[in-house]
Amino acid sequence: MGFYELSSLFLNITFFLYLIATAFFGLTLGKNRESNKKSKAIKIAMTFTIIGFASQMTSYIFRWLQAGHIPVSNMFEYIYFFSMMLILAFVVIYFIYGIPALGLIALPIAVVIIGYGSMFPQEISPLVPSLQSNWLYIHVTTVALAQAILSISFIAGLLFLIKRVDQSQSSKETTFLELILFGVVSTIAYIILSSSFGAMDYEATFTKELEEQTVDVTYSMPALFQPHDSELVTEGVFNSGIETPGWMQGADAGLKLNTLVLSLTLGGILYGLLRLILKGRRVSALLNQKFDKINPDIVDDIMYRAIAIGFPLFTLGGLIFASIWAQQAWGRFWGWDPKEVWALVTWLFYAVFLHLRLTRGWHGKKSAWLAVVGFVIIMFNLIVINLVISGLHSYA
Amino acid sequence: MANETIRCECGHENKEGTVLCEACGKPIEKNQHIDGNDQQNVLEMRYEGGARRSQTYKRTFVDKIWAFFSSVKVGVWLIVMTLIFSALGTIYPQEQFKNSPLPSSVFYEEEYGLTGKIFYQLGFHNMYDSWWYIILVALIGVSIIISSIDRYVPLRRALKNQKTKKNEVFVKRQRVVSFDNELSENDLNTLKTNLKKQRYKVHEENGHIFAEKNRFSRWGPYVNHIGLIIILIASIFRMFEVMHIDDYVWVREGEVQAIPGTGQEYFVENNEFIYEVYDPETEERFTRALEDVENPVPKNFQTNATIYRATNDPVLGEKPELERVTEGEIRLNQPVIFDGYSLYQSGTQVESEYNSISMELQVNDESLGGFTFDTDEAPSEFNLEESDTTITIDNWYPELEFTDEGPSSFSKYPRNPGIIFTVSSPDLDEDERFFYLQEEVIPLADNNQANVSVSDVDRRSASGLTVKKDNTLPLFGLGAGIFMIGVLQGLYWYHRRIWIHPKDGSYHIGVHTNKNWYGMNQELDKIRKGTNVKPFVDQQEMK
Ligand code: HEM
């Protein structure tokens, strides 16, 4: 077995270990279970988390050995590293603050993120000349670590909101909470869709005229939206005949729209089923009941501290190291490339968070919502900018 | 501006607008609304209750401007606006990235339809250089400066003037407190030892104890804001041409070119251009990935260059005398740096130009000889002595294109050479004309006797080099460094204080930290250890 195969093997093991850890964290749910059973479940869950982390690290090192460079040079590797840092940050926070309820959110999120990442091509890719720089690795790894720590503030914020948003009546806050949960469910739906149609080797190819050239666009899911002005060439596959609107740019616009709509649709169905099972009750209302009591001051503190630590790291990795690399590669340390702009947006956003924390009345729920928005920006950065708006960094 | 002072019962003279006496901390009755202390039990400690100009004077125009810019709310709005506009600018490519020969007024609408047109008409295609974006950032700068001065001055005064002995009200209205402790001499000594162990500085006055640590962390925000201001100043400098050079030069293999932007002082020679791609056969670890892509994946772009410097002041038209300065391999991520200039590998035209074209002449299977056309020299005539043949170059098109007026050259670079030439020879009845294009020779006469063929072509690569010199880099670096120091100072350390206040034989203890109350509480457990101090109470706990 080569390094590459070993790496894949350990990654699969990691995935299952995290799933098991999630299940044990799940056993801490509910009011009726005895507390010593719960603390046993927590211990087991943490053990699996830590073994899982070790296994992920092992897998990562094998990949590193195989590639000959730190594997952070494509989307799969970046997300992989990010999820590893997320778990690391969670474990550290657990040992400082000891709040198991955080694991109940952190692990499922890590699992979903790893699942999402593995939808990208996993081959070890050679480095094009612009990526052959040590500053690049320093920049990317610091950013990933910073983003992982900032994500902890989201996890703490979400926990805070689950416990503190008044669920006795529906309000704007409850609606937004449901929206977040719907987002998570849709990501799971995306993973289900990609992996099941991927296992079937489903393919539907369209041809399309683009700038006087004929290009092929291959869908690996049924086409609800075919590319604008295109023709289906694969036989015997489903096609709705609905075209992607022409103002969406790029050859892959239809593909992206299709994947998005399908994922949201399946996400909606899954979410609807959940609501049906709950007899119409809000999912967040259920979670509110099931989660243990928290100390709101401590969770609020974690949320803030994660940002207080993540913000300087992000400045260093996302702005300073990034500038040094850009200066070295292109002779311009800042060029208003979309990814650079979004790093700036992220940075400004967390600066706003820090300033508002200094203002009276912004602790607690308001901060928590900000932490959620921050995570949305990070995910937007990771997903939308890489996949939709392309710039220098679009190594995906 | 009036310069009234307020005298506290402890005897300290405070500036007008002070909320908490700088010395003893006693709330100054008439100013409690400023920080909202009249509505809550726990005192607002953010600026130590110092007299901020923005909260004190609100009469004149200057006062109002000052108050406006020193408001964090205003600052936050400015940042939020910048953030939103920055994000909006990424919806479609900025003008500089649009990568199309179409003018912007057409491009955005053509490419993205109505939304593209709106994007263009709002000026978002040039967002980051637009005057309103720059003004927005400048306003942030103004806001940072004013708000920092507004707070720094009173904060420093208050921290400098604070006394060990505090007013009872001040101690009791801290967020974390422990009241009515019966403490023995022993307890007090243990407390003091514990405090020192936690690296507090302990002060005593008439039985009052005051412990403090990490005061320097309070200056963090001001330090980081100075860093930001330096960065903003650096960006202003960078707007001026003299501060930086940004130029571009194409150098063909074997060619020496003046480096633009250096005033004909420096020259670069392209000794060799190297282009390598990943080979799936030999790079086994990448085989999997390389099999998936159609085009070869580039591995290296490299120019082996020599840098020269002119030793004399070249007179116009004269060739300068050159002295070798340095030699180097310029790669992506690896510029060559000399005397503050950097040369970056940034463009490549692999074998895109013709160096020379060799042709052979024949008449009735008998050779008349051959000639080599050098594209740089482009001689107008060749004489083949062995057969007394003359070749006259009638027209030379380095980059041939056909327009309505017939053949012409698009540029002076031999990327697609076209040559029209005439052959005269005693072996021919009359002169014959030929047209060389795209490595073929086409006779222009109907019944030509001579036969011309291309025997060899020699191509060359050109390397595009960016020339950079940026005098503002050190300033940016300085600003970034100071910013990082300030941020770490303010966010990784916490200013903590503990007051032990004797009252009628027992002790009240008040505790303040500017952030991280969780850590403070853990530290208090260690400080309380081995003493009779009652558990501390958080008077502001979320329920
Ligand atoms: C991009 C711009 C800015 C950045 C990155 C930035 C950064 C920071 C940071 C990191 C802190 C420390 C926060 C903490 O300790 O929790 C801070 C504090 C502060 N900032 Fe800014 N800032 C920016 C702009 C502004 C602006 C425009 C204002 C104007 C109102 C401002 C006013 C303040 C004030 C008043 C403090 C608090 C000082 C204190 O409480 O001791 N900042 N800033």
Image (tube, coloured by chain):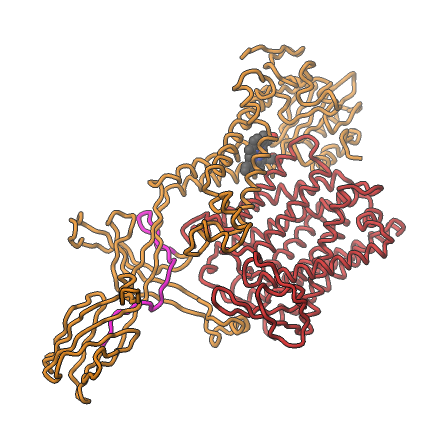
Residue drawn at (69%, 27%) of the image:
B498
Q: Residue B96 location, x and y as percent? A: 44, 50
From the rendered image, report the letter of the chain displayed in orange.
Answer: B
- Quadrant hosting residue B505: top right
In the picture shown, does residue A318 fall above or below B352? above
From the viewer's perspective, tell me whether residue A236 is left or right of residue B475: right
Q: Residue B250 location, x and y as percent? A: 31, 58
Q: Quadrant of the C terminus of chain B?
A: top right
Instruction: Looking at this view, name the residue that lies furthest to the front.
Output: B404
From the viewer's perspective, tell me whether residue B188 is left or right of residue B380: right
Provide the residue span drawn in magenta: B335-358
Q: Is B58 colored magenta in this rendering?
A: no
- Quadrant hosting residue A26: bottom right
Of residue A295 and residue B94, the one placed in the foreground of this image is: B94
From the rendered image, report the letter of the chain displayed in red.
Answer: A
Q: Residue B4 location, x and y as percent? A: 58, 10
Q: Residue B164 location, x and y as percent? A: 65, 20
Residue B217 in view (yes/no): no
Instruction: Looking at this view, name the residue that lies furthest to the bottom.
Output: B365
Q: Main secondary structure of the magenta part?
A: strand
Of residue A38 and residue A223, the one placed in the foreground of this image is: A223
Q: Is B349 colored magenta in this rendering?
A: yes
In the picture shown, does residue A355 fall above or below A239? above
Of residue B533 and residue B241, the one placed in the foreground of this image is: B241
